[in-house]
Every structure is written in structure tokens, then in C-alpha cells.
Image: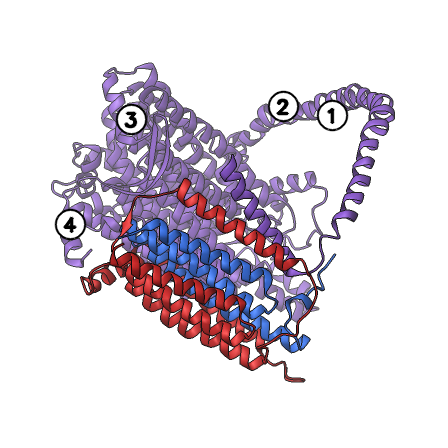
Chain colours: A red, B blue, C purple
């Protein structure tokens, strides 16, 4: 039991707990907040894995922007709680059963088939993090320049799409 | 000194929870959140492998996933708002007008 | 690359723009031209051609600062198959740059001239929309010609060779739905097809030669082929003889030599700038260029050289005799072009490459000048004709009286005879559209006369072109023709006399033309009212006239003045430069002057009257008849080749293909048997009992299954997701347990 492992296990517990919390809370606002917690802990994992830039993107984009958008929509629509319904009564037990099988299967596969002896050591803090960032930027803007530009177009299209979808059609406003 | 397998297992469990969320929740907003959770699980695996292989490709992939997720959420939420406007309700089980 | 660096080391990197500049111009006109005014279209095309000229100048400069060293500029990989490895490479040496300069220089002047010419031409022919098309074709031609002369292999040369052939076809048939007189007919498109098909015969020879080269030397790249020829180290070896003679077939096709010259006179159906650019100055000289380019091969095959020289010399004389008997101003020039090409081919056949090239250049100047001036004359007559017609309409009653008084009929007798060929074609195409009543031929010299007063600028320009072509000292033609004659007199006496006779006739028919067109009295209302052409047409002519006067300075036969010889020597090896031989020069000049004098006696002293037959007709009798009817060569070809060919193809199509193969074999034997088998055996038993039954069963089963399956589609997204999940679990399970 080394320190890294302890940190990992504690963080894993928080992550899993918050994910389950998101899953099972009745109020959508709580779900969203649990998910924020989940994202933040995952961000910490990223830091441990030596990916500070991704960690910061995770917090700003996911935990920040995206989740705020979620909360905004939840509160705008007033759909924190849905009325209970009895459609598809066997859906829930069946889904849980499948999920458990899936989890078992994937864990088995990782250990039995794809087990790797590699270990990850938490990076020493502040070692060359700027250097890392620079290298990553070089890779991003040299090797992956085209996907990067395509992504920008995708974001633009999404923006236009969102505006077009929610635009109010004013009567006689042609 | 954490074996990379642990990260992968954590990622797998998170993914399963996300999938379960998609299956059992009826609120499309929460289904969306579950999808985000699944994406996160994938990202976690990417970053873990990136760290093992000492390569930036995994991280850059995650970067793109985050960008795509942002675009997806923008469009998806717009769709949900629009559906709510026409149906006054967003229960996913009520959206069944495509049944055979 | 920095400018200063380029100035020091050369502008070779610009070479691709030789081709791309005209292509860019073409694309601009093609894509945006619809919105452009005529002036813009013409300017864009001229600028594109001018850009190619600038590039040519820079390349020539680059070659000269590199002391004539040949440069290759590889643009793209083209073909790599087995042993064959060819790139699109630009070969820049003194020979190719000389050609480039002539092509783009004369080409640009003709572009400018064409702005004025086509402006009126499209209006006389009532289709303004074709103005743009003309310039697109013209630019395409410049690009193809550049590919031809800049190619570094026989195949690249062939690409350009075919490209210019295509452009020639497109431009000869530019007014494809009419004949030269603007009447509705397929004559022009027949002329275009004739040019294309005759050229195809030549191309066939070229291709065979190229195949032979590849077969023997495993390459088509110039230097590698030459190396292969050198390695044979044999004089008159069968391989080189075969290659050179097959190349000669190609040369005869493209450069209009016996026996394939017949397309060039008909090519005059194209607009006059085309005749000047393609069928006088540039494309037809491609054959001469090919021989010069292949000089190392010809050098090892003196026998083939002899054949080339004889072909050229005989063509020169033969075409000159025909030119004497023609009445169409452009036809005379066309036969003159064939004759002059004969001079060039004879020169390069004798190994006098510099002389041939020199004559090629000067000929480009003065023949373009002559053609363009002829275009000016024709347009002047068109203008006069419209003017006269207009006046006639205005004073409807007065017209007959006036006509009777001045004795100027609107229709010249014997005209039908001239346009005989066109009428033939019309008869063949029974569907020719409504016959226009108007049959005035603005190109017929018998309709002209006295134009010196109404079109003074054109007259003087035409005079300059004429004396240059006739070879009068000190005009350009004198120097270049003399150099050829001198070479011939030293080595090949027969050829010398053939060429001298041709030169004599050249001066004669040009004199005849001058007297008929510009002197005497107008023989037609149109000539009386002819108007001078605008500046945009005459200015390029002035430039060409200056070049025709001074072009001889390129290669004067005096010590220290062999500029062209020295320059081309970089590429084809230093050639001994002959000094001026006063005897040869004196004989040819004296003969030329004598010929002009004789022509004055016949045509100038007593100008032709209206309806008067040609004064040569009586004294020469059947000889003139022969010259007038082009020695019946077209008719002979018709009888020997075309008629049997048509008959055989008709036989093949009707009897063999249609009656035997289609009616008997296909319809009766194959289709009959097939129908019988399919009706009895397949339809009744196999199809209905087995196949149909199976298909029906399949349909029923599908219906049943889908009825069962549609229940799965319950419309709940979540249950669909559940099925996906189930699939994932099953696949993972398979992966675990497999």
C-alpha cells in the first residue's frame, strides 16, 4: 500500500459514489451537481496522470460550461422531478442485470486478457509542466492541425444548429 | 505506483454506470448526463494509456472528445428545449411516435 | 526565389507558366467570360498570351546567361510503367525558346488583332456569343503549342501535337454550320474533319516512329533516344531509316507536305486570325521543329534526309504552281504557306537547320502579316458590301439603273465555279438549312480591285508582306530564303533548281495578287465601298510589318552577324555559317523581280475587267486549268481512297454487319434459339414452377416474420438502448468464451 494507491482508491470511491448519486437521485438538479463532483474528481485523476491541460479543460469545459448549461435548462424547463410512470416495468431490473454482467465481463477481460504490468507514478508537481504543454501544443498544431480546424467548424455548426433549433418563429416575420 | 489496470477498471465501471443511466432514467436531461459520464470514462482510459505510452496522442484525442461533447450538448439541449415546447413534457417514454 | 538570384541564375522556374498562363486566361474567360464585355474577354486572352511571351523572353534570357546550356524543369511525374518512365518536364534550350518566342510573340499580336476582327466577324455572321469561345480556343492553342515545343520527350511533344491538332479542328470548324460565304451548310465542319482526319494519318506515322524508338531504345526522352541512336553507330541503319521516315509522315501531316498537304487549303474555312496563327505561323511549323529536334537521328540517316529534302522541295514547287491559279485571296496564301513550308522542310532535310529555322521565323512574321492583312481586306469588303446593300435598300428604285450604268453586277460570273467545292458538300447534306440568297464572296479576288485607294494602310502592309515573301532585298524573306537556296546550291543541285523555280512562282503569284486586289478598278460594289480597318487591327500589323522588314537582321550572312546560327548552335551543334553568295542571291533576286515584272505585264498593265477570265487561261491552256483545279489532287484522293473506303465501309456496315451479323446471326440464330429455349424450357417449368414459387414463398415468409417482429418496435427509446446493451454484453461474452 503506497501513498499513490491510497489516493487513487479514495478518489475512485468519490468518483463512483458521485456517479451512482447522479444515477439514483430523483431530483435532476442533484444529479447535475453529483456529476459536477464526478467531473472534478476525474480532473484530479488527469492531474495524477500527468495531463494538466486536459484536467483544466475538463474543469472549465465540462464541470463549468456544460454543466451550467444543463442546470440552466433543467431550471428553465422546470423538470426537476418527473411524475412516476409504469411504462416498461421490466426495463429497470433487466438493465441492472445487464449492467452488472457488463461490468463483470469488462473487469474479467482487463485482468484475464489485457492485463498490463505498467504502473503509473504520479508526476512530481511542477516538473516541466510548461514544457509538456508546449510539446502537446506542437503535436496538436502540427500533426493534428486538420482535425483541429475541422473541430472548429463542428463547433460553429453546432452553434448555428442550436440557434436555428430554438429560434422563435415569429408569425408573419418573413 | 498505481497499476494502469486499475484506471481501466475504474473507467469500465464508470462507463457501465453511465450506460445504466441511459437505460433506466426517463428524464432526457439525465440520459444526457449519463452519456457525458460515458464519454468521461472513455477519456479517462485515453489519458491513462497516454500516460503509460508517454505519448500526447491520447490527450489530444481527449481534447477533441471534449470539443465534440460541447457541440453535442449544445445541439442536444436545444433539441430538448424544442421538444418541451411542442410536447410540454420531456418524459422519454412519451416520445414514442415512431413505433411500428 | 529572389529576383536578384533569378537574374543571375535564370528564370527557369517560370517555365510551367508558359502553359499555365494561357490556361489561366482560358479559365477566366470560360468561367467568368459570360459577364465580360468583348473588350475584356479579348484583353484577358491577349494578356494571357502576352504573359507567355514575357515568360518566353525571360527563359531566352536565362538560356543566354547560362551560355546556352539546356535546362530541364521537371513539373510532375507522369507515367511510370515498367521500363517507360516519363515526366512532364520542360526542356528549355535555345531551340525551344526560339519557338516559344515566335509562338507567343506572333500569337499575342494575333490575339490583339482578333479583338477587332472577331468583333466584326461575329456580327456579320449573327452570333455574338461566339466571340468568347474564339478566344478560349485561341488560348488553348497557345497552351498546347507551348507543351509541344517545351516537351522533353517525344510523348510530351505528341501531347502538344495532338492538342494543337484539336485546336486546329475546333477553330477551322468555328463557324461549323455554314460555309465560307456564311450560307448554311456543313462545308466548314467538313473542312475541319478533313484537317483532323488527314492529320490523323500523319499522327499514325508519328506514333509508329515513337513505338519504334521505345522498342529499340527503351525510352522516349529526347537525349536517351539520341544516345541510343548514337550507340547504334551505323549510318543508314534500318532502325533509324524507319524511324525518320515514319516521323516524316507525321511531319507531312502537320506541316502540310506532299502527300498530306490537302487539308491546309480547306483549313482556310476558319476565321482569318486562325489561318494566320495556326495555319501559317505556328502549328504548321511544328513538323519543321520536330525534324530539327530530331536532328541527331536524321544525322545518322542521310538517305532519309534526302527523302525529306526532296519532299520539301517538290512540295514547294507543286504548291506554288497551284497558288498561281487560285482566285480566293486566302487560298493563294494557303498554297503559298504550303510552298514555304516546303522550303523549310527542304532546308532541314538538307541539314541546314539554322536556315530552316530562320525561314520559319521570318515566314511567321510575313505570312502572319499577309494573312491578317488579307483578313483586313475581307472585312473591308464585307463592310463595303453591307454598305452597298444598305444603300441599295434605301434607294430601291435606283439600284438597277445604277448597276447598268456602272456595269457592276452584284454577282460575278464564274463565282459558282469557285465555290464548287462547297456546293458539292451541300448536295451531299440534303438537310442543309435554308439557303441564303446572298452569295457574295468577300474573299474572291475577282470581286476586288482598286483597294489601294479605299484601304491604304492595309495596302502598304500587304505590300511589305509581299516583297518580304517574294524575297526582295533587304526584306526578311530575302535573307532566309537565300540561305536555304545557298545551302541547296552547294550540295543538292536538283533541290536548288526546284526551290528556285518555286521562288520565281512565289514572286509571280504574289505580284498577281497585288495587282488583282489593290490596283485597277473595283470590280464589285463592295470593293468600291470598302472601308479601312480599325486601329486595333492595323497596329499589330504594323508591328509584324516592322518585323518583316527587319527580321533578316536575326541572321545576316556576314561575319559576326550569324546571331541565330550561333544561338541555335548551342542546341544543335555549331553549324558552319555560309557567307553571302552573290551569284545565288543575284539569281533569286533577279528572278523575283522578273516574276513581278511579268505579273505586271499580265495583270497590272491591263487590269482585270469584270467577268473577264484570267488572262493566263488562254496562253497556258490546260496547264492553267490544272493549276486552277489544284491538279485534281482532291479528286484523285476522292477516287482512289475516299470512294473505295466509303464503299467498303458501306459494305461492311450493311452487308456484313447488318444483314449477316444482325439479321441472320443475331436475330435468327441466337435470338431465335434463345427465345425458343426460354419460352418452352425456362418459362413454363424452371421459372414458374421453381423460381416464382420460391420468390412467392420468400415474400410470404418475410411478411410473416415482419408481422412478428414489428412488435419489437414499441417506440420506447430506452428499450432500443436496452437491445444495444444486450448486444454489447453478448459480444463481450463471445470474446470471453470463444
Q: Which mark is nearer the camera, 2 or 4?
A: 4
Residue labelled with disc 2: C644
Q: Is residue A79 left or right of residue C228?
A: right
Q: Where, quadrant-wise, is the N terminus of chain C in this rendering?
A: bottom left
Number of residue marks: 4
Q: Residue at x 29, y 31 (%)?
A: C222
Q: Nearer the viewer, residue C670 or C491?
A: C670
Q: Residue at x 39, y 70 (%)?
A: A61
**Image height of C437 relative to C244, above or below:** below
Is the Cβ of the residue at disc 1 closer than 8 Å to that at disc 2?
no
Mark 1, residues whose alpha carbon is within 10 Å: few (<14), some, or many (≥20)?
some
| SS assignment at label 1 | helix
Say which label, 3 or 2, has the lower sequence index.
Answer: 3
Q: CA distance from mark 3 to mark 1?
A: 47 Å
Residue labelled with disc 3: C225
Residue labelled with disc 4: C9
Say which label, 3 or 4, has the lower sequence index.
Answer: 4
Q: CA distance from mark 3 to mark 2?
A: 39 Å
Q: Which mark is nearer the camera, 1 or 2?
A: 1
| SS assignment at label 2 | helix
Q: Nearer the viewer, residue C302 or A3?
A: A3
Residue C277, x across and y down, in percent: 41, 48
Q: Please report, as a chain letter, where disc 1 is located.
A: C
Q: Please report, as a chain letter, where disc 3 is located.
A: C
Q: Is residue C81 left or right of residue A121?
A: right
Q: CA distance from mark 4 to mark 1?
A: 67 Å
Numbered tag placed on residue C658 in the rendering? 1
Amino acid at each position: 500500500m503506497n501513498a499513490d494507491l491510497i489516493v487513487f482508491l479514495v478518489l475512485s470511491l468519490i468518483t463512483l459514489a458521485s456517479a451512482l448519486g447522479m444515477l439514483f437521485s430523483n431530483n435532476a438538479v442533484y444529479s447535475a451537481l453529483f456529476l459536477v463532483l464526478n467531473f472534478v474528481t476525474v480532473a484530479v485523476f488527469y492531474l495524477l496522470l500527468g495531463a494538466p491541460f486536459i484536467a483544466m479543460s475538463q474543469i472549465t469545459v465540462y464541470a463549468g460550461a456544460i454543466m451550467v448549461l444543463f442546470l440552466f435548462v433543467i431550471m428553465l424547463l422546470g423538470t426537476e422531478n418527473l411524475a412516476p410512470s409504469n411504462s416498461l416495468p421490466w426495463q429497470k431490473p433487466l438493465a441492472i442485470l445487464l449492467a452488472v454482467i457488463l461490468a463483470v465481463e469488462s473487469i474479467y477481460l482487463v485482468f484475464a486478457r489485457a492485463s498490463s504490468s505498467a504502473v503509473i507514478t504520479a508526476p512530481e508537481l511542477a516538473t516541466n509542466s510548461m514544457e509538456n504543454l508546449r510539446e502537446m501544443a506542437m503535436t496538436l498544431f502540427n500533426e493534428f492541425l486538420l482535425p483541429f480546424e475541422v473541430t472548429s467548424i463542428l463547433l460553429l455548426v453546432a452553434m448555428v444548429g442550436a440557434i436555428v433549433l430554438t429560434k422563435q418563429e415569429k408569425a408573419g416575420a418573413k | 505506483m498505481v497499476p494502469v489496470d486499475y484506471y481501466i477498471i475504474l473507467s469500465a465501471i464508470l462507463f457501465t454506470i453511465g450506460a445504466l443511466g441511459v437505460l433506466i432514467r426517463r428524464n432526457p436531461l439525465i440520459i444526457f448526463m449519463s452519456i457525458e459520464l460515458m464519454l468521461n470514462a472513455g477519456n479517462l482510459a485515453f489519458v491513462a494509456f497516454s500516460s503509460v505510452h508517454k505519448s500526447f496522442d491520447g490527450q489530444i484525442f481527449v481534447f477533441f472528445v471534449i470539443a465534440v461533447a460541447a457541440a453535442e450538448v449544445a445541439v442536444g439541449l436545444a433539441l430538448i428545449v424544442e421538444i418541451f415546447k411542442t410536447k410540454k413534457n420531456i418524459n422519454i417514454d412519451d416520445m414514442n411516435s415512431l413505433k411500428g | 526565389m529572389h529576383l536578384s538570384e533569378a537574374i543571375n541564375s535564370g528564370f527557369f522556374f517560370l517555365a510551367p507558366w508558359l502553359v499555365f498562363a494561357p490556361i489561366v486566361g482560358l479559365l477566366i474567360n470560360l468561367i467568368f467570360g459570360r459577364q465580360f464585355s468583348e473588350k475584356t474577354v479579348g484583353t484577358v486572352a491577349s494578356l494571357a498570351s502576352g504573359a507567355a511571351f514575357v515568360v518566353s523572353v525571360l527563359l531566352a534570357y536565362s538560356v543566354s546567361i547560362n551560355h546556352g546550356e539546356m535546362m530541364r524543369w521537371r513539373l510532375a511525374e507522369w507515367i511510370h510503367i515498367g521500363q517507360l518512365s516519363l515526366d512532364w518536364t520542360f526542356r528549355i534550350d535555345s531551340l525551344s525558346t526560339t519557338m516559344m518566342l515566335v509562338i507567343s510573340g506572333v500569337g499575342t499580336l494575333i490575339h490583339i488583332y482578333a479583338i477587332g476582327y472577331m468583333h466584326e466577324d461575329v456580327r456579320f455572321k449573327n452570333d455574338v456569343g461566339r466571340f468568347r469561345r474564339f478566344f478560349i480556343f485561341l488560348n488553348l492553342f497557345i497552351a498546347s503549342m507551348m507543351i509541344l515545343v517545351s516537351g522533353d520527350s517525344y510523348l510530351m511533344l505528341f501531347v502538344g501535337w495532338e492538342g494543337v491538332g484539336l485546336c486546329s479542328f475546333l477553330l477551322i470548324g468555328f463557324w461549323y454550320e455554314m460555309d465560307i460565304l456564311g450560307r448554311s451548310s456543313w462545308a466548314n465542319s467538313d473542312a475541319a474533319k478533313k484537317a483532323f482526319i488527314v492529320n490523323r494519318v500523319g499522327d499514325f506515322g508519328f506514333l509508329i516512329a515513337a513505338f519504334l524508338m521505345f522498342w529499340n531504345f527503351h525510352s522516349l526522352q529526347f537525349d536517351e533516344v539520341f544516345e541510343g541512336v548514337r550507340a547504334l553507330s551505323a549510318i543508314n541503319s534500318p532502325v533509324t531509316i524507319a524511324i525518320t521516315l515514319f516521323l516524316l509522315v507525321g511531319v507531312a501531316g502537320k506541316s502540310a507536305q506532299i502527300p498530306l498537304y490537302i487539308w491546309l487549303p480547306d483549313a482556310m474555312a476558319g476565321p482569318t486570325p486562325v489561318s494566320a496563327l495556326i495555319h501559317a505561323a505556328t502549328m504548321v511549323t511544328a513538323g519543321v521543329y520536330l525534324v530539327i529536334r530530331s536532328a541527331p537521328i536524321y544525322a545518322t540517316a542521310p538517305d532519309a534526309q534526302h527523302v525529306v529534302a526532296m519532299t520539301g522541295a517538290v512540295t514547294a514547287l507543286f504548291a506554288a504552281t497551284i497558288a498561281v491559279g487560285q482566285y480566293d485571296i486566302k487560298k493563294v496564301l494557303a498554297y503559298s504557306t504550303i510552298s514555304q513550308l516546303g522550303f523549310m522542310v527542304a532546308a532541314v532535310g538538307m541539314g541546314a537547320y539554322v536556315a530552316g529555322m530562320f525561314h520559319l521565323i521570318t515566314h511567321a512574321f510575313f505570312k502572319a502579316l499577309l494573312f491578317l492583312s488579307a483578313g483586313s481586306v475581307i472585312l473591308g469588303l464585307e463592310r463595303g458590301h453591307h454598305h452597298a446593300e444598305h444603300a441599295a435598300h434605301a434607294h430601291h428604285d435606283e439600284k438597277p439603273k445604277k448597276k447598268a450604268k456602272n456595269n457592276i453586277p452584284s454577282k460575278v460570273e464564274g463565282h459558282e465555279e469557285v465555290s464548287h467545292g462547297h456546293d458539292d458538300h451541300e448536295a451531299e447534306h440534303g438537310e442543309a438549312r435554308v439557303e441564303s440568297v446572298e452569295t457574295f464572296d468577300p474573299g474572291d479576288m475577282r470581286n476586288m480591285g482598286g483597294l489601294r485607294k479605299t484601304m491604304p494602310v492595309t495596302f502598304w502592309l500587304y505590300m511589305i508582306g509581299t516583297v518580304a515573301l517574294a524575297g526582295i532585298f533587304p526584306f526578311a524573306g530575302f535573307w532566309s530564303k537565300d540561305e536555304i537556296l545557298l545551302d541547296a546550291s552547294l550540295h543538292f543541285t536538283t533541290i536548288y533548281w526546284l526551290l528556285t523555280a518555286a521562288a520565281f512562282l512565289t514572286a509571280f503569284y504574289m505580284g498577281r495578287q497585288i495587282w488583282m486586289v489593290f490596283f485597277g478598278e473595283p470590280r464589285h460594289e463592295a470593293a468600291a465601298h470598302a472601308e479601312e480597318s480599325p486601329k486595333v487591327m492595323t497596329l499589330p500589323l504594323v508591328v509584324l510589318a516592322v518585323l518583316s522588314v527587319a527580321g533578316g537582321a536575326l541572321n545576316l550572312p556576314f561575319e559576326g552577324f550569324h546571331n541565330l546560327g550561333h544561338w541555335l548552335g548551342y542546341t544543335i551543334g555549331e553549324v558552319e555559317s555560309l557567307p553571302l553568295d552573290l551569284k545565288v542571291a543575284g539569281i533569286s533576286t533577279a528572278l523575283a523581280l522578273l516574276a513581278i515584272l511579268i505579273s505586271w505585264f499580265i495583270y497590272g498593265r491591263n487590269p482585270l475587267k469584270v467577268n473577264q477570265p484570267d488572262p493566263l487561261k488562254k496562253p497556258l491552256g490546260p496547264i492553267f486549268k490544272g493549276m486552277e483545279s489544284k491538279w485534281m489532287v482532291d479528286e484523285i484522293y476522292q477516287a482512289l481512297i475516299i470512294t473505295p473506303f466509303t464503299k467498303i465501309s458501306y459494305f461492311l456496315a450493311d452487308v456484313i454487319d447488318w444483314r449477316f451479323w444482325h439479321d441472320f446471326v443475331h436475330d435468327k440464330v441466337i435470338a431465335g434459339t434463345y427465345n425458343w429455349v426460354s419460352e418452352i424450357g425456362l418459362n413454363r417449368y424452371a421459372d414458374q414452377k421453381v423460381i416464382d414459387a420460391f420468390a412467392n414463398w420468400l415474400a410470404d415468409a418475410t411478411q410473416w416474420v415482419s408481422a412478428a417482429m414489428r412488435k419489437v418496435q414499441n417506440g420506447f427509446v430506452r428499450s432500443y438502448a436496452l437491445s444495444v446493451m444486450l448486444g454489447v454484453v453478448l459480444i463481450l461474452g463471445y470474446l470471453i468464451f470463444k
